[in-house]
Every structure is written in structure tokens, then in C-alpha cells.
Amino acid sequence: MEARQANIRQGRRFTLLEVVIAVGIFMLVAVALFAYSRQTTNSWTRIMQERNTFSELLTLDRAVDQIFSHVVPFLWPDPNDELENEVPFIVANSESLRVAYIHRLNDEEEGALRFVEIMVKDGNLCATYSDRPFIYWENIGDRLWTSVLARDVESVTFRYADWGGDMTDAWSSRLKWVDEWETEDSGRTDVPLAIQMTVVWQNGKIESWLRRTMGNSYRERYGKWEPQEDDDD
């Protein structure tokens, strides 16, 4: 009888040991699965963030290509001028850009021209459009709509390519970059040869786009133009 009870007690201790081992193995498996699941979740989160970033950049790239590559000179009478002289529809400085560009014809009433202003508003890079050439945009009324090109933007910077006074065949000598496209006092009616836009996001990311404008080549271009004197001349 005593031997039987001893065998029973010994069997119970062995069963408890098995349970401890089984629990330990289960915990190891659970920890491994948790670590794998966490790593998978983090990888998926990064993939989704990269996908969203790429989608945002792709949308912005398409908008830049559609606008910058089709910028054209455009003149329109100034309503504040008694003689209603025609003035260039372009306001281009380092922080904002307002231009006319050719757009595909969706509606005969709207025409194939678009007028757009690009600048940062409330942390977003916005493109404000109109299908009518209002010189003073406060008079546009309901013929105005805005599209957000990029969110969480810190700043945007524009630069504009122009021909310099050096008429040699060397691009490095002829081409110059300016931070503002002056037309009011210079009498110019043309548009920049190319437009560069640099966007700085709030997370520190920086991207740049460069597009040549429509109708501007090495030997000919739209609009009245004369070489500008270099600043150091």
C-alpha cells in the first residue's frame, strides 16, 4: 500500500513537471509569435506610410507637370487702368506663383486655359484655380476652387530660369536663376524658361521639381523678350 502511494505521489510530481515544461514552451512560442506579429505590424505600418508618401508625391508630381510644363504668356486688360492696357498674367516670386497654363478642353464654356496660384496656406500646399483671367483675384467670386497638393508643408520656394546678357553658346553662361519674375516695370510679357519648386515638409523631408515651360526652347520662345542685364554689370 505504501509503495502504491509512493508511486502515485511520484507520478503526480512528474505530471507537474510536464505542465511546467509545457507552459514554458508555450510562453516561448507566445513571445516569439508576439515579436513576429509586432515586427510584421511595424513593417506593414512603414509600408503603408511609404505608400501614402509615394501617392502624395505622385499626385504633386502630376500637378506640377501639368501646370509648369504648359505655362504660357497671357495678357489681359487691367480693370484699374483707365486705358485698360493689357498686362501679363503672371505673379512669380520666391513664395508663390500665379500663372496661366494650357489645360485639356473639358468644357467649351471653360475653354482650354486655366489660371492658377500655388502657395502654402495653413500648412498645406494649395493650388487655387480659376477658368477666367481675373487680374485681381479678390474679384473672382464663385469662379474659384482650391485643391490641396500636399499636406503638412513647412514652406515652398520657387526659382525661375532666364537668359542672361551673355549671348555665347555656353548654357552655364547664358542661363541664370532669379527668385522673382519682374514684369511690371520691365515691360516683359514672356514667362520663365523653366520653373523650379522646392517643398519642405514639417517632418524635414525636402523634394524639388524642375520643369521647362511650354514654347521655350534654345532659339525661340513665346512673348516679347530681350536679354536682361546681369546684376553685377
Image (cartoon, rainbow, N blue to C red):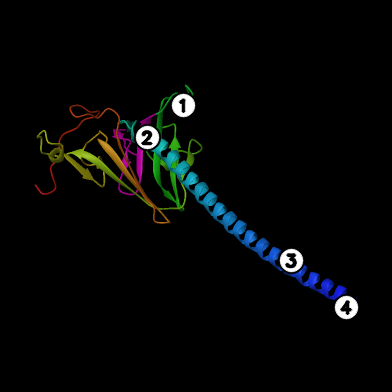
Residue holding disc 3: 19
Q: Nearer the viewer, mark 3 or mark 4?
A: 4
Say whether disc 3 or disc 1 marks the residue closer to the N-terminus: 3
Residue at point 37%, 34% (across, down) = 65
Residue at point 69%, 66% (across, down) = 21
Q: Which residues are magenta?
A: 80-102
Do the numbered discs 1 and 2 sit on residues whose CB atoms are within 8 Å?
no
Residue at point 72%, 69% (across, down) = 17
Decide: is 125 above or below 70. below
**Residue 27 falls left or right of residue 183:** right
**Residue 4 falls left or right of residue 135:** right
Residue holding disc 2: 65
SS class, disc 1: loop
Say whether disc 2 or disc 3 marks the residue closer to the N-terminus: 3
- Asked if residue 100 is among those painted magenta in the image, a careful observer would answer yes
Say whether disc 4 or disc 2 marks the residue closer to the N-terminus: 4
Q: Nearer the viewer, mark 1 or mark 2?
A: 2
Q: Which mark is residue 84?
A: none
Query: In 3D space, how far apart are the residues under numbered discs 2 and 3 (Cα atoms)?
Result: 67 Å
The type of residue carrying mark 3 is: Val
- Asked if residue 95 is among those painted magenta in the image, a careful observer would answer yes
